[in-house]
Image: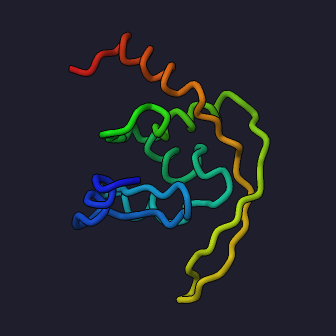
Amino acid sequence: MGVIPEVFRSFPKVERSDHPTHSFGLWGKKGRSWSLNHPLDESLSDYYPLGKLYENKGFIFILGVDHSATPPLHLAETMVYDFPKQKYGFPMMKGGKKVWEEYDDLQYNSDDFNLIGNEFEKKFPIK
């Protein structure tokens, strides 16, 4: 993602989920348990960790990017739409060895995220 998320993830007690494309850096008393078992399938749906943040009224800090990179909007779209799935594959470390892992994930679509985010900011300005 960039320098800011990498610096955040280097802080003490910040846990990182191990998803190859949609990992999360989590800080707080539940960070460790929420970062474990981040499923490969439907990685931005109501499963760990994004759904757990939502369930528990957690916060997501987004800095230096536009709304096209806003994960909560993906969670919202999975609650509304029935997206088709697509097969993905990535090298991952398992048991100290690099392996090729395939999984099915939703075909997320962020085309309207800037429009949605800008409208949200107009109605709920940050103070």
Left or right: where does residue 12 sit relative to residue 97?
Answer: left
Q: Quadrant of residue 62?
A: top left
Residue 59 visible, this orientation: no
Tell me where residue 76 appears, x and y as whole percent: 57, 31
Query: In percent of the image, x 36 and y 56: which residue is there?
Result: 26
Tell me where residue 82 appears, x and y as whole percent: 76, 34
Left or right: where does residue 3 sit relative to residue 56?
Answer: left
Left or right: where does residue 107 sit relative to residue 51?
Answer: right
Q: Quadrant of residue 46?
A: top right
Query: In percent of the image, x 69 and y 72: which residue is there?
Result: 101
Rendered view: 45 above or below 1: above
Q: Quadrant of residue 90?
A: bottom right
Tell me where residue 3 appears, x and y as whole percent: 30, 56
Query: In percent of the image, x 57 and y 24: which residue is there?
Result: 112
Rendered view: 40 above or below 64: below
Quarter of the image containing the C terminus? top left
Q: Nearer the viewer, residue 112 or 39?
A: 112
Residue extending farthest top: 123
Residue 25 visible, this orientation: yes
Rendered view: 71 above or below 22: above
Q: Nearer the viewer, residue 30 or 49?
A: 49
Tell me where residue 121 appears, x and y as whole percent: 36, 18
Left or right: where does residue 13 sit relative to residue 112?
Answer: left
